[in-house]
Image (cartoon, helix red, strand yellow):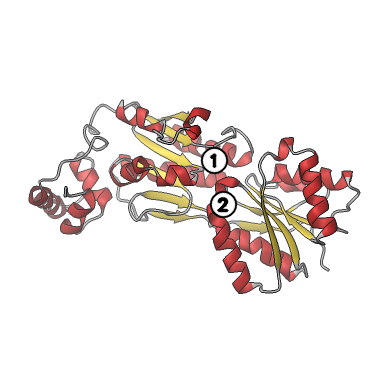
C-alpha cells in the first residue's frame, strides 16, 4: 500500500499542510522540520500526487471560489452575496482576483461525478480554492478529500476532515439556540424549516432538542423553493399552524421569512399575535426592514468570507497558520416577531 501525505506527516511530527508546503517550497519552517520531512519522504519513497506537483510554478494570482448550490443560483439569498463581498475584499487587498466556479445541472444527475473545480486545479488556472455550501455528495467525493489533504483549499462549513483548513459558524448550535429562545418564550409546538443542503445536520439538531427541551414538539420540514412556493407553502402553514397548533415558525433565511409573513397575511394569521416568526440573517439588520421586524440570528457571512480568504492566502504564501479551523459566533437580535405565551 502506497504511503500517504499523512504517513509522512506522522513520521516527521508535523502537519500534512506543513509537509505540502515543504514539498512545494513555500514553507517558512525550521531546517530541523524540513530535514524530518525529507527523511520521512525518503523512508516511504513518497511521491506527491497530481495536485501537489508543480505548485511552485508562476502564480496566476487567481483564487477559485466554488459553490455547488444544487438546484439554485450562487447569487440567491444574502449568504453567498455577503460571503463573496468578504472574499473579494480580502483578495483585492492582497492583489489577488477570484474565479467563480459553479456546477451544471448535468453534474447532479450523473452517478459518477467529476467536480468542476478539478479542471481548474489540473490546468493550474488557480493558485488555491475556497469552497462553500458543500452538500453531502461534494463532501463524500474522493476528489474533495484528496485536495483537502494536499492542495491549498479552505472550505466553509463544519469540519469534516482532520486535515485541511476551514471556517465555520456553528450551524447546528445556532439553530438549537433559536429553538431554545422560542421555548423560553413558552412555545411548545414549533415548525422548523430546513433546506435539503442542511439535511445532514437535521438529526443532530433534533437529538439535541430532545435532550435539552423534552417538552418541545418539533415539526421539521425540508422545503425547497420558497420564492415559487405558492399554494404549497399556504398548505404547510394551514397544516402545522392552524391544524397542528404550532405557535412559532423558524424560517431558514430572511427573504424566506418575508415570504412566510406574506403567506400568513394571506391566511389572516397575525404575527406575532397568533404565530411567532424567527429567522437567520446574513446581512446585519436584514430583518429590521420587514413588518413586523423579524427577530433573527445574525451569522457574519461577510466576515467568514474575508477570514477564509485570509487563511487561504496565508497558507499559499507560506505563513505560519495559528489555527486550522476558525469558528465564528453568531449573534441573536431580538425584534418584534416573537410573542411570549
Q: Label 1 belongs to which residue?
A: 83
Q: Position of residue 12 (x, y in %)?
A: 16, 56
Residue that appears at 62% across and 63% down: 176
Q: Which mark is residue 252?
A: none
The answer to whether residue 283 is seen in the rendering is: yes
Residue at the farthest right position? 268
Frontmost residue, 251 versus 38: 251
Query: In the rendering, at what x and y percent does residue 204 appear?
Result: 54, 62
Question: Which residue is rendered at x = 81% and y = 67% of the image?
Answer: 340
> Taking 308 as reference, is 78 left or right?
right
Q: CA distance from mark 1 to mark 2?
A: 22 Å
Residue visible at 79% across and 61% down?
246
Tell me how many marks there are. 2
Camera sees residue 61:
no
Which residue is rendered at x = 67% and y = 46% of the image? 223
The image position of residue 25, as x and y in percent, is: 19, 39
Q: Nearer the viewer, residue 43 or 294?
A: 43
Mark 2 highlights which residue?
199
Dividing the picture into quadrants, the one containing residue 50 is top left
Number of other residues with Cα within 10 Å of mark 1, as a class: few under 14, some 14 to 19, many 20 or more: many
Determine the secondary structure under disc 2.
Answer: helix
In the visual, does 156 lie left or right of 258? left
Disc number lying in front (1 or 2): 2
Q: Secondary structure at mark 1?
A: helix
Q: Tell me whether circle 1 and circle 2 mark residues in contact (CB < 8 Å).
A: no
Q: Earlier in the sequence, mark 1 or mark 2?
A: 1
Side of 126 where 241 appears, left or right: right
Q: Is residue 131 above or below residue 297?
A: above
Q: Where 79 falls versus 92 (above or below)?
A: below
Amino acid at each position: 500500500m502506497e504511503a500517504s501525505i499523512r504517513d509522512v506527516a506522522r513520521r516527521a511530527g508535523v502537519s500534512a499542510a506543513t509537509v505540502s508546503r515543504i514539498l512545494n517550497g513555500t514553507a517558512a519552517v525550521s531546517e530541523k522540520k524540513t530535514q524530518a520531512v525529507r527523511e520521512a519522504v525518503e523512508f516511504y519513497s513518497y511521491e506527491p500526487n497530481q495536485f501537489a506537483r508543480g505548485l511552485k510554478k508562476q502564480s496566476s494570482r487567481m483564487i477559485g471560489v466554488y459553490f455547488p448550490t444544487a438546484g439554485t443560483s450562487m447569487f440567491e439569498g444574502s449568504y453567498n452575496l455577503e460571503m463573496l463581498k468578504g472574499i473579494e475584499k480580502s483578495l483585492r487587498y492582497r492583489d489577488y482576483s477570484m474565479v467563480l466556479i459553479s456546477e451544471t445541472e448535468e453534474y447532479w444527475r450523473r452517478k459518477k461525478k467529476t467536480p468542476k473545480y478539478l479542471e481548474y486545479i489540473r490546468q493550474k488556472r488557480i493558485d488555491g480554492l475556497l469552497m462553500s455550501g458543500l452538500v453531502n455528495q461534494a463532501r463524500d467525493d474522493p476528489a474533495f478529500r484528496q485536495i483537502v489533504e494536499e492542495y491549498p483549499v479552505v472550505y466553509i462549513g463544519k469540519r469534516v476532515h482532520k486535515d485541511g483548513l476551514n471556517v465555520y459558524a456553528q450551524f447546528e448550535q445556532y439553530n438549537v439556540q433559536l429553538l431554545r429562545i422560542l421555548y423560553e418564550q413558552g412555545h411548545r409546538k414549533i415548525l422548523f424549516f430546513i433546506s435539503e443542503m442542511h439535511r445532514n445536520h437535521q438529526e443532530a439538531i433534533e437529538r439535541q432538542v430532545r435532550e435539552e427541551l423534552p417538552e418541545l414538539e418539533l415539526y421539521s420540514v425540508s422545503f425547497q423553493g420558497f420564492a415559487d412556493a405558492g399554494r404549497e407553502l399556504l398548505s404547510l402553514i394551514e397544516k402545522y399552524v392552524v391544524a397542528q397548533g404550532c405557535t412559532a415558525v423558524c424560517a431558514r433565511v430572511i427573504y424566506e421569512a418575508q415570504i412566510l409573513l406574506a403567506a400568513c397575511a394571506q391566511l389572516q394569521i397575525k404575527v406575532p399575535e397568533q404565530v411567532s416568526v424567527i429567522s437567520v440573517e446574513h446581512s446585519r439588520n436584514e430583518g429590521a426592514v420587514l413588518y413586523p421586524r423579524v427577530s433573527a440570528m445574525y451569522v457574519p457571512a461577510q466576515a467568514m468570507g474575508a477570514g477564509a480568504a485570509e487563511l487561504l492566502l496565508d497558507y499559499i504564501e507560506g505563513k505560519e497558520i495559528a489555527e486550522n479551523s476558525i469558528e465564528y459566533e453568531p449573534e441573536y437580535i431580538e425584534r418584534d416577531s416573537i410573542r411570549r405565551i
